[in-house]
Amino acid sequence: MNELETRSPHPRAALSALAQKADTGYFYELEDIEIKNFGIAGISSMQNQLAYLIATVNRQLEDELQDKLRPEGIPIEQFRILSALKDGNGLAMGDLATRVLVDSTTLTKIIDRMVTAMLVYRAPDPNDRRKVLVFLTAKGGALISRLEGVVGEQEEKLVNRLQQNKADELTKILQTLVRN
């Protein structure tokens, strides 16, 4: 038995005691946590939590990518924008914000900087004059062509570390999480 089990005869009381001791600022919904044998199951150390592990891997990959993009002077958000626009069709600001994982206000500021750097330009949507589409310039297209190898190298390195079959399985799992 752990410290909380011996102090509290009721599992919900033990869980409440644990929640009160936590300095994380997070509160757990008691109904969402499985309690077995008066122990506290479902709460593990932060380093073993799936969301924490995904966030940690994401941070590592983004830091690595940012280090490789730094010589070109392109922040990772601008790289994502260039990548999203490379098909040449242009995207509305709302669609672009969703694709590059940036809120609309932040995206507007980033696009303003990219317009100034002549990497992208804005044009009215021919089908809806209320919308503005964002397109790559020739300079932006050339830049993304040069930088795509950086992401390709990172992807290849990651696949090699995991082995192809595990990388494929992880891709499917993550795609399922994104869709749901």
Image (cartoon, rainbow, N blue to C red):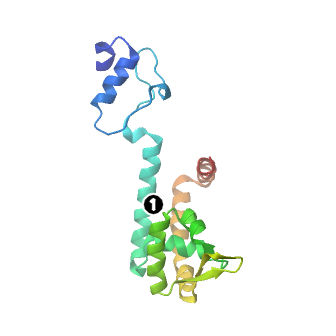
Frontmost residue, 144 versus 106: 106
Q: Is residue 97 visible?
A: yes
The quadrant of the image that shows the N terminus is top left
Q: Is residue 112 above or below residue 160?
A: below
Q: Measuring 28% from the left and 19% from the top, which residue is drawn there? A: 3
- Between residue 134 and residue 155, name the one nearer to us: 134
Between 166 and 57, the one nearer to me in the picture: 57
| Mark 1 Cα shell of 10 Å, populated few (<14), some (14-19), many (≥20) | some
Relative image position of residue 6 (x, y in whole percent) = 30, 13
> Which x, y percent locates residue 108?
48, 73
Reply above or below: 176 against 71. above
- Per the image, the residue denoted by label 1 is 61
- Mark 1: secondary structure: helix
Location of residue 170 with respect to 24 vertically, above or below? below
Q: Residue furthest top?
A: 9
Q: Is 56 left or right of 124, judged from the image as shown?
A: left
Quadrant in which residue 73 is drawn: bottom left
Q: How many marks?
A: 1
